Amino acid sequence: MCKSRSLVTFLLLLCSASLASAAQGSTAWQTLDGNAPLVIAHGGFSGLFPDSSSVAYQFAGQVSLANVIFWCDVQLTKDAAGVCAPNLNLANNTDISSIFPNQSNTYSVNGVSIQGWFSVDFTLKELASVNLIQGVFSRPNKFDGVFPVVTVNLIPQFSPPGLWLNVEHDVFFTQRNLSMRSFVLSVFKSTIVDYVSSPEVSFLKGLVARLPTGTKLIYRFLGRSDVDPSINQTYGSLLSNLTFIKTFASGILVPKSYIWPVDASLYLLPHTTLVSDAHKAGLEVFASDFANDAPFAYDFSFDPVAESLSFIDNGNFTVDGMLSDFPITQSEAIACFAHIGKNVSGQESPLVISSKGASGDFPGCTDLAYQGAISDGVDILDCPVQMTKDGIAICLGSINLLDSTLVAQSPFSNLSKSISELGISNGIFTFSLTWSQIQTLTPAISNPYANYRLTRDPIYKNAGKFTTLSEFLVLAKNASSVSGVLISIEDAAYLAEYQGLDVTDVVLGTLQNASFSTQKVMIQSTNSSVLTKLKKESNYELIYVVDENIGGADNSSVAEIKTFASAVVVSKSSVFTDNAEYLTGMTNVVQMLQAFQLQVFVQIFRNEFVSQAWDFFSDATVEINSYVMGAGIDGVVTEFPGTAARYKKNRCLGLGSKTPSYMSPVQPDGLYQVIPPTELPPAEAPNPLLTESEVVEAPLPPVAILAPPPGNSGNQATPPTKSNAQLEVVSSVVPSFLAFLIAALALF
């Protein structure tokens, strides 16, 4: 109990940000009463803490809308006490099986035999020795065994803005001579209950006559083919009889798929008319099953805020409330993002920089990825430059074609080799194929979290066409919404020395030919030698990429960077340190670099919840906000530019002391500090400091002039030199005999 109280106290201090609600827009809501939809916290903040624990309830109250509703699934004990637990089988979210190992039982529940530990077999006193655990294995387990089971009459001590009691199995309890109706009526005498829901018609009808003023009854729909045991009808059949439900209930609670169904491949189907039909019948509609760490439609790009907005801001209907394990997300959606409009410009910072275009939705660096990023509202469109065998600069995320194409399934699969200088033991390289050959390859979408069974959009997994640098520049130049381009140059030394390819000169020549006037041009590299050369030969904005996690930097290293760059890209872990996916603190890297007048961009932001520390609540928007508002970064490098671009438009920014808690940055070590000592992960060594010796590099080597292999001159690319660096973009105006002469001279 001492651990429980100390953790709750700390979290209340952690989340003591203002609870002032942001303005929720002037556009009228399409709810039944015209008010903003409600957020119902399912067992509190059960996406992070054990469901129905005291800390889950109190945390939900701190980070959600001021009128958030606390949800309690009511179970009855042997002595008719009511406790909050999400399932009849207490083994699903308590340690009861280890406390009472020999007291399991088997019951028939709605015709299904279930073995487990049931509340009806224990008194409240016996359950006092039982503690709660996280019931979803993919969620944090560091708070297991800390918090006791919560009784219904204890919830008022958590100061709930609203209370929702859900009674799932009245028939089951009645069969055990326990009256759920009597219990709920007794709660009415001492506690204000805003909502009571049940999937059993008879139970709700039994409450109608004695319902307190202000308490609403909600009929809960389960699966369409499931049967309401109290009337022996399927929930699917009851959908066509909403006027009957109106005779005893004020609203309905339905799985979100009843409103926005998905097909077998997890793509959205057209929305149903359920919300409008129920509203016409005078019924409120609440949607359930919102969870940031559960699969939802690919249409939402792994972005839970986008999913929530589809239920409340789609132009056709608005649900009256959303039941969520992560109530902060629905709070953001309602108060900060709904009704902002497509033409809102948003704040200038942070810069939204794409990573291979919208590579979270399409194969990176394809025309579709770039068009998607432009449509998403990206500020800076990026092109990682690679060189082909015939000296063409193309956009591709890796020099190794195995990383972004199906080259292994092509006629070029026999070109695989190891190159120690590049640190690649198995690769098929861009410089081994001509541009025309690369154009025949099938793109492949990146799936960085396939091990977690999180795969990106399968419809587009092999869609799109690759582009040359010059084609990319034309695309960006014609996109008026794009403020600039970012070109990445890597492996320049290797390409020059071993492949006879001068990537820096080719990039400069292509840029000169493109003649950018209003859009900025940024060039980045992990190699200071590349940027030093470009500093001498161009006036473009140069960005140094730190390719390791750092815990800080000495003054001399930052001063050296300042001599050739105006911005620095660092990793997320160089800003917020973490251990076992819990944030452990914040470095001074951002502040130190900015003190030298260097902008700081951070990479790589992704929407998949497994890419984020637990502290960000499996919500990409919370993560971005914490880096921007908490760490003060200048730009985000992201594979999902739509999420970052939408963040800049939200109405909860720029409110100063009135910033609501759901748009306040997280405390970097908040959760880590309160993990029980026995559950702390092993300590990790701190990230190293960036030193001047790591920044300074030798100048780029001269470009080697390579002779063609004997007997194979027809297939050997002409090595580009400084004199023909712009050959790709100006060849149409060079007389053919002159081009031939230049190529011939390059061989000597």
Image: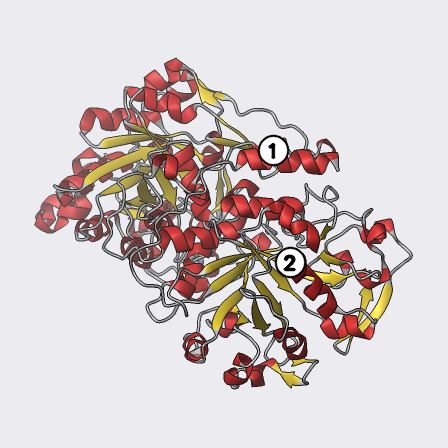
Distance of label 1 from label 2 (alpha carbons) = 24 Å
Identity of the residue furthest to the right in this view: 102
Along the line of sight, which residue is nearer the eye, 260 or 566?
A: 260
The label number, if any, that marks residue 10 in the structure image:
1
Along the line of sight, which residue is nearer the eye, 497 or 205?
A: 205
User: Is any part of residue 700 visible from this angle?
Assistant: no
Disc 2 packing (10 Å; few <14; some 14–19; many ≥20): many
Indicate left or right for 449 with 89 as reference: left
Q: Quadrant of residue 167?
A: bottom right
Along the line of sight, which residue is nearer the eye, 148 or 125?
A: 125
Q: Percent from the top left, x then y, of residue 197?
A: 61, 68
The amino acid type found where label 2 is placed reads Cys
User: Is any part of residue 383 visible from this angle?
Assistant: yes
Along the line of sight, which residue is nearer the eye, 93 or 243?
A: 243
Compared to residue 137, the image places residue 207 above or below, namely below
The label number, if any, that marks residue 72 in the structure image:
2
Q: How is the image coloured?
A: secondary structure
Q: Percent from the top left, x then y, of residue 624?
A: 42, 42
Q: Quadrant of residue 142?
A: top right
Q: Are marks 1 and 2 in contact (CB under 8 Å)?
A: no
Q: Quadrant of residue 113?
A: bottom right
Going from the N terminus, do you reach mark 1 or mark 2 first?
Answer: 1
Considering the numbered disc 1 on the image, is that residue within a helix, a strand or a loop? Answer: helix
Considering the numbered disc 2 on the image, is that residue within a helix, a strand or a loop? Answer: strand
Q: Residue drawn 44% across and 77% down?
A: 272
Q: Percent from the top left, x then y, of residue 553?
A: 43, 19
Disc 1 packing (10 Å; few <14; some 14–19; many ≥20): some
Compared to residue 38, the image places residue 4 above or below, namely above
Q: Percent from the top left, x then y, of residue 248?
A: 57, 78
Indicate left or right for 245 with 318 as reference: right
The amino acid type found where label 1 is placed reads Phe
Identity of the residue furthest to the top in this view: 556
